[in-house]
Image (spheres, rainbow, N blue to C red):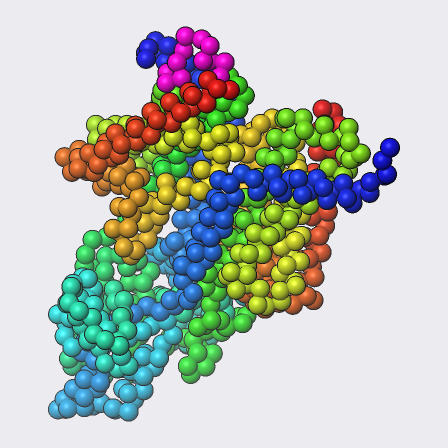
Amino acid sequence: MSLKRTLKVLGKDFRLGPRSPIFMWVLFLPVFLTLVLQVVFGSLFEPEPRMGIVDFGDSQITAAFGRIEGIQLALLGDVAGLKAKVEANDLDAGLVLPVGFDDSVRAGVQPPLELYVGGESLASNRTILVATTLELIRDVEGSAPPVEVEIVALGKEALPISLRLVPLIVMYALVVAAVFLPAFSIADEREKGTLAALTVTPVRLSEVVTAKGMLGFVLAFAMAVFTLWLNSALGAQALALVVVLAVAAALCAEIGLIFGAAAKDVNGVFALIKGTGVLLIGPTIFYLFPDWPQWVAKLFPTYWIINPLFEVTIDNSGLGEVWQQVLIAVGIVALLAAPVMLLTRRLRGILAMA
Amino acid sequence: MSRPVSHLSIVRSILVKDLKEYGRDKLWAFLTVLVLVAFIVMYWVLPNSVDETITVAISPSFETMVETAADTAGAEVDSDRLDELVAGLEQEQGLAIVSVESAANIEALVAGDATAYVDGSQTIVVPKGARPPQGMQKADVNIGIVFPDDFLAATASGEKTTVQVFVDATVPEEIRVAMVGIVGEFAYAVAGDALPVAVPGPEEVYVVLGQDRLGDQVTPRESFRPLLAFMVLLMEGLVMSALIAKEIQQRTVSALLVTPATTGDVLAAKGIAGALSGLAQAVVLLAATGSLSVEPALVLTLMLLGAVMVSGVSMIAGSAGKDFIGTLFYGMLFMIPLLIPAFATIFPGSASAWVRVLPSYPMVQGLVNVATYGDGWSDTLPSLGALAAWCAGLFVVGWFILKRKVETL
């Protein structure tokens, strides 16, 4: 195998590759997924109680609600609009504060409480919003509470959902760049006959396959770094990050080569990806649901690349802490080399007979 | 010399050829079944209930506190009123109160070093790793309140006490604030301080708007059903567009046109093949998830219209792509916006105005209203009308674009 020829094929792929829509996928998907998962779906996993307020009198309750983390506050201009939103379950509850509400509470007049709750709001959200509303009204009243409440927090604070989504987004970036790209590229060239044409040149098939793998590796590495940066999750362990990402990109690139060499056409690659996608992405779902039995994630081969990546970027672990996991991932890379070589040899035979 | 062949039999022949070609790829067929099974399994794995309550462990029990208050010498305690207040707090919607023996138990439960098992009013606290008791239900406690033994007596007589609220570090800020409010309001009530506001009724602080679904919330399983069904349609839409692109690329479609088949016959066959393959899988999914038990004819009509709409989009994507990858790319560009309304159903509340104008919205919303809220034909007519209009529009556009593509080959 000649490194010079391999690099030449790689150069050609880098030059001509951007004409293919798959390159657009590689560049576009991490940005798209970051936007969709972080902005749109972040709220799906940790829904917050939603309170709407129509405040006609600049009440201190409105300002206090705005300061409470974890309650989504919407300020509305009219009562009918507020009631419509509460009824449509766009808000869990709605509070109307008339002019002089605070003064009436302070004066002990007991103004009427106009609080609406949506029929589809959860009981827990109702409890939170009602209890908080009464607590804030008591604050306005200014009377000394008959009890001192002391909050004692125990245990380790949970990671926010934005960080728990990072493995999923990075894994997609790795899979699209290192699995989709080499696999589709090989199958496409095979289908169009350019792979067979190469066999009559000095370039060997193993060099072409290696070049495709390198293409996936380089782009996967770059896109993973870009995705981590996009999610503000690069961490502080640069060396560990480089090592872990290199192993991750290599493992994914090998899977891409296996798919590309095994499938008879691009439809076949799509079928393989459609069928095995769950296995590739599977472990990342466990970060979203910490209550699930976490040992199950270890059964997926990609766990051994995504977990060290998670520990290095999110927990700021160094190589000393993740070396065992990285070693297992390197072992998987070594094991996968065998099917890559066998399938490349098989593909060479098929092309020779074509 | 041969006798003339009807358009119907030509369309049927092309359709059979397409479906055979589809089924000939064993790997593809196997993986299609695998994905369908995975979707069905995913549906059944999703929770079929909504946990609406916050479970709170308290120590000592209210019973003990009331007894202590009654026994406290010199304390002016109205036991009946205290019983009433305690019952009110215990029946608070959204709160599940578990009484445990000691403050140490509370700390162990909240720290995750022990688990509480409940059977009626009996609670057993089991240390981590120990065998759970038979026939008792596990209670997920991450908040615990430790009252002083004389809390009721002291508070009733105007003496200020300190209550400790233990929370797991994962408990969000809004629940902590609410806990302070709940304990505070309970203490105000015990001390005999009325609310500083007038409430709608003696037991009502708020007014419920719309149908009260307390205890009967839409479950994650129900929320995901339209998404899964629509994803099956879209997946098949992508496959259909790939098959169309392949025929264009390999010019087999041109070869067909030198036979008695017209462009219209070929397009009709493609459209039907796309709609049928998607619809068949969606029906299997809906049947396997028990979604055809309510208004099956209405659900199937919605799915049929959805399948035809996706088939129209497949024709557009199939004409646009130069090869499989290109088709997949264009297919995704068209399909992702169509998927948004299905995702929107997972979230509470009504969809934004821009989501409601997307072609797939009437299908998804119709499916939600029928399967989850039990709507019938008359309630669903507006959705059906809008969907039929989108369906016809997209199918005609798809037909026109693909026809032009085929005729210019």
| Direction front: furthest residue | B1
Tell me which residue sits at (64%, 49%) in the image.
Answer: B276
Spot occupied by residue B345 in the image (x, y as percentages of width and height): 52, 56
Towards the viewer: A72 or B387: B387
User: Which quarter of the rendered picture does the C terminus of chain B lie within?
Assistant: top right
Q: Is residue B86 left or right of residue B409?
A: left
Towards the viewer: B147 or A328: A328
Residue range (magenta): A196-207
Spot occupied by residue B67 in the image (x, y as percentages of width and height): 18, 88
Tell me which residue sits at (16%, 81%) in the image.
Answer: B150
Residue A281: say if magenta: no
Q: Is residue B21 left or right of residue A273?
A: right
Spot occupied by residue B249 in the image (x, y as percentages of width and height): 63, 26
Quarter of the figure with residue B135? bottom left
Towards the viewer: A161 or B186: A161
B50 vs A183: above or below: below
A66 vs B208: above or below: above
Residue A222 in sight from this viewpoint: no
B388 vs A21: above or below: below
Q: Is residue B47 left or right of residue B248?
A: left
Number of labels in the image equals 0
Residue A200: say if magenta: yes
Tell me which residue sits at (33%, 30%) in the image.
Answer: A339
Quarter of the figure with residue A73? bottom left
Tell me which residue sits at (30%, 28%) in the image.
Answer: A338
User: Which quarter of the rendered picture does the N terminus of chain B lie within?
Assistant: top right
Residue B224 in sight from this viewpoint: yes
Q: Is residue A320 left or right of residue B27?
A: left
Spot occupied by residue B381 in the image (x, y as percentages of width and height): 70, 61
